[in-house]
Image (cartoon, helix red, strand yellow):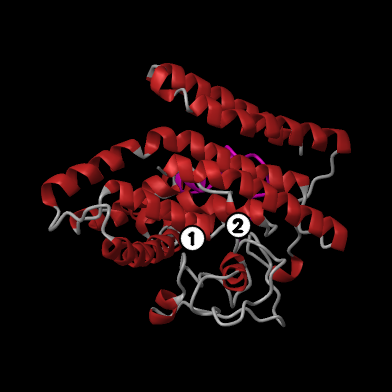
Amino acid sequence: MTEQILGVAIPFFILFILVEAAYSLWKKKDFYRVNDAVSSLSCGSVTILVEVFSKIPWILLYIYLFKNFSIVQFPISSIAAWIIFFMFNDFLYYWAHRLSHEINFLWSGHLPHHQSEEYNLTTALRQGALQGTIVFPIYLPMAILGCPIEMYLVLAVVNKLYQFWIHTRTIDKVPLIEGILNTPSAHRVHHAVNQAYVDRNYGGTFMVFDKWFGTWVEEDKANPAVYGVRKPYRSFNPIKAHIDWWIRLGKDAYHTKSWKDKIKLWFMPTGWRPKDVSNSHPWDTFDLASFEKYDPKVSSRRQWLSLTLYAIIAISIPTVLNLKGQLLIWQHALIVLAYLLLIYLANRLNY
């Protein structure tokens, strides 16, 4: 069912991205850059390829818990169950999202989504390949409370689909729903690196949980959002994007002399570092006033080649993934590795 929903949604994603890009070009808004857009879309493709394997154990565990330990088992035809679990899923999403910003190892999965220094509809598709896998345990109470796996998967997809339209600068504040539902204005705050906006507005569909737990901030036009992360990625490599924070944490774990800190740092607040490593291997400090976008200049020919190669990759991936039931796991793994290499090459043309 989720594949059918995505199958219907993808052509609309492409259409709206093209419309937004055309609007940006027409109005000379500079909302789009080829290098950034291809990198964001490529991160989404990497996520699709990885999650073919990574989520299977968690889904099997979810099914096992539902069948053997659920308090009650709601039928998938129950309208009340759909409504209740829609709200509960969004509540769990708030905490999964918030914790992904607040704990070092969880941030490694979510970080790729924030690395883009632009904010447009391609950013919505820029997902962390391990994000859903790492935070999946947070959603297991859904199984215990009796949400069928089919219902959960649909609700998870619907939550993501809703968030597509909020990744845009073309829509101002939306009357009546601001502060109640997630909107482009609310989510621009979430993606900003301005001090007043950092670690705010975690909600998926609803903003009420942010208001309840004190993380809601309204967008201020006098303080325009600057996008990206405070430890700038400075690359368009979509493979490295997914391991960049893991590498940072790994280096700190290696260099610290404290065995306690070697373990502790993975579970500490995002950016926490052992004192000895912080002194011996300091990170660059973030200065919003001197912030500049990463934008290496390459020829138009290389940009068009990059865009064309990625388009071929994106069009062919769904067809290949549909063959997964006919392939041995090692054959599927080889195909995924080949795609990852092609995705890397498509982005390497842009820097």
Q: Earlier in the sequence, mark 2 or mark 1?
A: 2
Check if residue 346 falls in the magenta segment: no
Q: Which residues are magenta?
A: 229-250
Q: Residues within 10 Å of mark 2 (few under 14, many from 20)?
A: few
Which one is nearer the viewer's eye here, 127 or 65?
65
Which one is nearer the viewer's eye here, 185 or 259?
185
Contact check, label 2 and label 1, Cβ < 8 Å: yes
Query: What residue do we see at 81% from left, 38% from top?
Result: 303
The residue pinned by badge 1 equals 271
For badge 2, the amino acid type reads Lys
Image vertical order of residue 173 relative to residue 51, above or below: below
For residue 135, side relative to residue 159 (left or right): left
Quarter of the image with the C terminus is: top right
- The alpha-carbon separation of the residues under discs 2 and 1 comes to 9 Å
Which one is nearer the viewer's eye here, 140 or 251?
140
The residue pinned by badge 2 equals 231
What kind of element bears circle 1?
loop
Q: Residue 28 location in percent, x, y?
A: 87, 61
Q: Quadrant of residue 287?
A: bottom right
Q: Residue 291 location in percent, x, y?
A: 73, 63
